[in-house]
Amino acid sequence: MIQSFFNSSNPIFSLSLPNLLLFLLGGLLTLSYSPFHVWFIPFITFPVLLIASLNSPNAKQAAKYGFVFGLGWFSFGLSWVHNAISDFGGLPLVFSLLLMIMLASYMAVYPALVSWLFHKSQSKFSLFIIAPIWLAVEYLRSVIFTGFPWLSIGYSQLTSSLSGYAPIVGEFGLQVIVMLIVCLILISLQLASCKIKSADPSSKHSTSIRKPQTLALSAIVIIFISGHLLSNYQWNESNNKHVDLALVQGNITQSMKWQPENERPTMLKYYELSSPHFDSSDLIIWPEAAVPRIEPSANRFLTDIDKRALDSNTALITGIVDYQKVTTYAFNNVIALGKKNAQDTIGDYQYLNSNRYSKHHLLPFGEFVPFESLLRKLAPIFDLPFSSFNRGDYQQDNLIANGINIAPAICFEIAFPKQINANLTNDTDFILTLSNDAWFGDSHGPWQHLEIAQMRALEFAMPVVRVTNNGVTAVIDPQGNIAASLKQNIADVLTYKLPLSESHSFYKRFGNTTTLVFIVLLCGFLIVSRKRNISAQ
């Protein structure tokens, strides 16, 4: 049994790791994500965490190791959240830091739970039990309190050979592959330690160690080579259509965005940036809440844009907030103006028409406030403008603009592949994500957000068009590569002729089913192996 290899009497597995080292190793994971892309870091840091968990004197100490590791992971990785809290939350520095620590501590509970469960199960199952444990805990992280699956380890492999598996198993399945490789690394390290301890390297004992070590290392090599080969497979097929895009990045300062005196100048800025592109583009796209008026109050402006787009044989998509006075419902919307279908001679837009998308997955504290009757009174961070939205439906019709079928996702929603997949159809031409990352300044937050969008493109073998207020506005091809982009913090328009294609992504068809079937089979194998060992004893 593999667990027999992991004995605390072996030097490499009896390390007493100081908490500071685990904290720093967790923080080091930040470099594996965008914009750094040092993809191999998880294969250094996670083996150390699992070694510490295995050799903890008890499960409580193992959980502490996991918590400290997670605290470093999310304190560094989510440090960009502090920009929003300190710059726009209206709190003194000490309180904004306290909120940041509370967020990182909450997130650290999940790796702590992984370490606790791993330690508890080590005497019963083999090392590979970490894969189902990890996946179960990460699933909880993606659903509890509406979910916050940011910095999931699958994203760290976007630029590695393992990314070739994404169109088959998605980011969810990539987490399993990472953990399986971590297990194989640990086995190789333990066997190497046993060989070093052997007095005679040519002895029968040393020879018996060499074979499983070779198998473990060979398995790692095969996994990476297979991923590389899969990355060369074409999961999409051209349909000989394209769309001329004009993506408008207004670069509106967040502190000015919702001030009444800046409403008209903001709308005029977007119109003036777009004006040269009406006659040359099939589709003009503005970012999330680009129009800083609620939709009923912006009716005249929207009607004028609708007519201009129609006269130019084009369409314009924009984010806008809608507040319905009769129902008192508020929605974070995406609407289409101008031509709905290429042959149309009249505009399709009217208030509350069906050709719109309402955000479903709302951001806690940003778009809804849990326990709001209590929290809104405590500090401005809990009473930001437009932080009390209603949810749109989980599954909505594609937005249609100038004959193009589009699956929208607003900001945070792009991190939820299951929801994206629920809104894809055989007619969907591309995924559109609108965002406003001005909250996060010149941090790595917007780059992590872009990386998530790249993973969605790779999973579904479908273009993703990302339009933001201040960057990173980009077009992502079906292989997850950035085909074109704008620099951050500038007002500009990105024009791009986007080739359209039909996706044959395995993940698009089956979602997480493949990964779940594998996990069930792995658990069955681990249970059978345990029973056989008990019988042999």
Image (tube, rainbow, N blue to C red):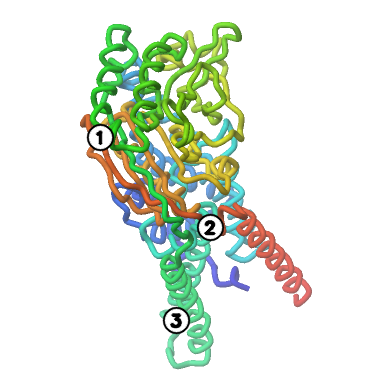
Task: Give the residue at mark 2.
Answer: 505
Question: Which one is earlier in the sequence, the residue at label 2 or at label 3?
Answer: 3
Q: State which quadrant residue 328 falls in.
A: top right
Residue type of the residue flagged with mark 3: Lys
**Coordinates of residue 186 in the picture (x, y in percent):** 48, 67
Residue type of the residue flagged with mark 1: Val
**Coordinates of residue 123 in the picture (x, y in percent):** 65, 62
- 475, 86: nearer the viewer: 475
Sort mark 2 into few (<14), some (14-19) or many (20+) by Cα contacts within 10 Å: many
Sort mark 3 into few (<14), some (14-19) or many (20+) by Cα contacts within 10 Å: many
Question: At x 45% / y 60%, what residue is drawn?
Answer: 47
Q: Which mark is residue 493?
A: 1
Question: At x 33% / y 26%, what residue is drawn?
Answer: 439
Q: Is residue 21 visible?
A: no
Q: CA distance from mark 2 to mark 1?
A: 31 Å
Q: Which circle, 2 or 3, is nearer the viewer? A: 2
Task: Give the residue at mark 3.
Answer: 195
Sort mark 1 into few (<14), some (14-19) or many (20+) by Cα contacts within 10 Å: many
